Image: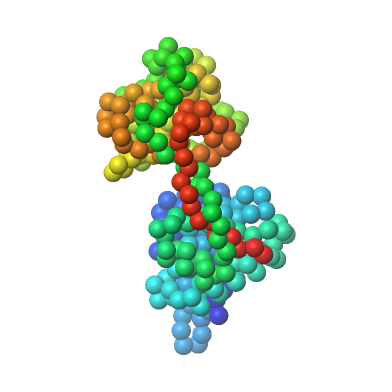
Amino acid sequence: MIRDIIINKNNIDAFSALIPEEYHEELNEGTLTGFGYYEEPTPSKKAEVVGTIIVRRFGRWLEIEWIGVADNFDLPCYTEEIFDTLSYRLSTSPVNYVGCYMKVYPQEKDMQKILSDGGFKFGKGKDGVYEFTVDMVDRSRLSKAEQYLDNCRSIKEADGNLLANVERKLREDARPLPISFPIKYDDYDQDMSMVYNDDDFSGIILSTVHEGYVILEAMVSQGVYSAAALLEYMLISFETLFDKKMVISVPVVSDEADNLMRKLVPEAQQREIQVGYLYL
């Protein structure tokens, strides 16, 4: 019989083989919740790890960010039991959850099968990621930013004092920010990540470069002009370093960011995905 346990810093080592390293920090901080699943021990057999599920809470919904199933338990009966166990935990929670869901790309056939075996129903959706090329950007929207470009530096050009000053200003911002401090600059491309700093405002863009595309992983700005300057500076750097047909990928996590993308890149489209829902 499968049992579950909430993953924490005291037991995460037992499940670490089924949890990507990128989730460990947030699990320890509590911004993500992890459930570990194991088969009960018997007199003749030790407890065995069956799987893990990593979730993020949005009100009365949980979004599943990761599912890991041990190879020797990769069978529909175990998958179904894992999700039955999750459903029971959520249905008995004082939060009164509606259910959980997971976004799946069309090419992820194995994950679609896991969710189907677990009783999920699928619908179409958008993944919140805009993809476009640099020549699709309406640069006239950024024209006023040119006078502020001198306040921008790539991470490669920025010295430690500048980076520390930017981080200090951003830490003092009262808004919740989509980045963790201290920023691990080595995780990002040094040419396509940049900071903005003047007497009043700071901002930062963090990007990663992959074969055929650049991902704008995070952007934080304390002012409209600083945001425009950062974007223009990023596009100038992009044009210097890459072919204009290379794709820029921007995950959108707020209505403000979505509105900005629609204004800057009217032709940009979000990628279609499948969304699996498990209602309680």
Colour scheme used in the picture? rainbow
In this rendered view, identify the residue nearer to me: 139 or 218.
139
**Which residue is at a point 36% across and 30% down the rendered structure image?**
134
Work out which quarter of the rendered image holds the N terminus and state it: bottom right
Answer with the quarter of the image where residue 2 lies: bottom right
What percent of the width, then of the height, locates residue 81? Answer: 55, 74
**Which residue is at a point 47% across and 20% down the rendered structure image?**
141
**Which residue is at a point 56% across and 49% down the rendered structure image?**
31
Answer with the quarter of the image where residue 124 lies: bottom right
Whether residue 23 can be seen here? yes
Q: Is residue 181 above or below residue 9?
A: above
Work out which quarter of the rendered image holds the C terminus and state it: bottom right
Question: What is the tally of numbered marks visible in this picture?
Answer: 0
What percent of the width, then of the height, locates residue 46? Answer: 46, 80
What percent of the width, then of the height, locates residue 49? Answer: 46, 72
* In this rendering, position of residue 113 left or right of residue 56: left
Among all residues in the image, which is located at the extreme front? Answer: 267
Q: Is residue 54 above or below residue 204?
A: below
* In this rendering, position of residue 279 left or right of residue 145: right
Whether residue 171 can be seen here? no
Q: Is residue 21 above or below residue 76?
A: above
**Which residue is at a point 51% across and 39% down the rendered structure image?**
252
Q: Is residue 251 above or below residue 83?
A: above
What percent of the width, then of the height, locates residue 103? Answer: 51, 54
